[in-house]
Image: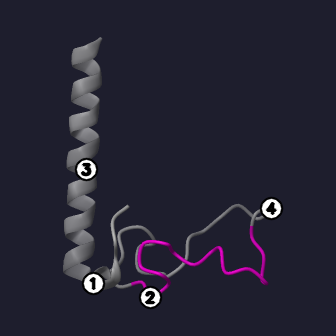
Amino acid sequence: MMHLIKLFNKWRNERFEEHVSKMKVENKCPDCYGRGFIVYPANVYSFHSDHFRCPGCEGSGLYEDWKPH
């Protein structure tokens, strides 16, 4: 069972690294895919709130502004 968990975590980390590399080439934030905001379910969204802004890039959508958390 532990071997399966280790394999899964390795696969997940490799997939994340590939995603980050792709976003770096495209100069897009890996968290929001360059949109500058995070898509939330409709019941969480509010026009009068700044909470939907991407916390990784602070709303710019650029890779160079991305801060991994």
Q: Residue at x 42, y 84 (%)?
A: 61
Q: CA distance from mark 2 to mark 4?
A: 24 Å
**For the residue marked with disc 4, what is the amino acid?**
Asn
Q: Quadrant of residue 47?
A: bottom right
Instruction: Please tell me whether mark 2 or mark 4 is closer to you in this view.
Output: 2
Instruction: For marks 3 and 2, give the one nearer the viewer.
Output: 2
Q: Which residues are magenta?
A: 45-61
As drawn, the label of residue 25 is none
Q: Position of residue 15 (x, y in %)?
A: 25, 50
Query: Disc 4 marks which residue?
Result: 43
Mark 4 nearby-residue class (10 Å; few <14, some 14–19, many ≥20):
few
Dot 3 alpha-carbon crowd within 10 angstroms: few under 14, some 14 to 19, many 20 or more: few
The residue at which mark 3 appears reads as 15
65 w.r.t. 18: above or below = below
Q: Are marks 1 and 4 in contact (CB under 8 Å)?
A: no
Residue position marked by numbered label 1 in the rendering: 64
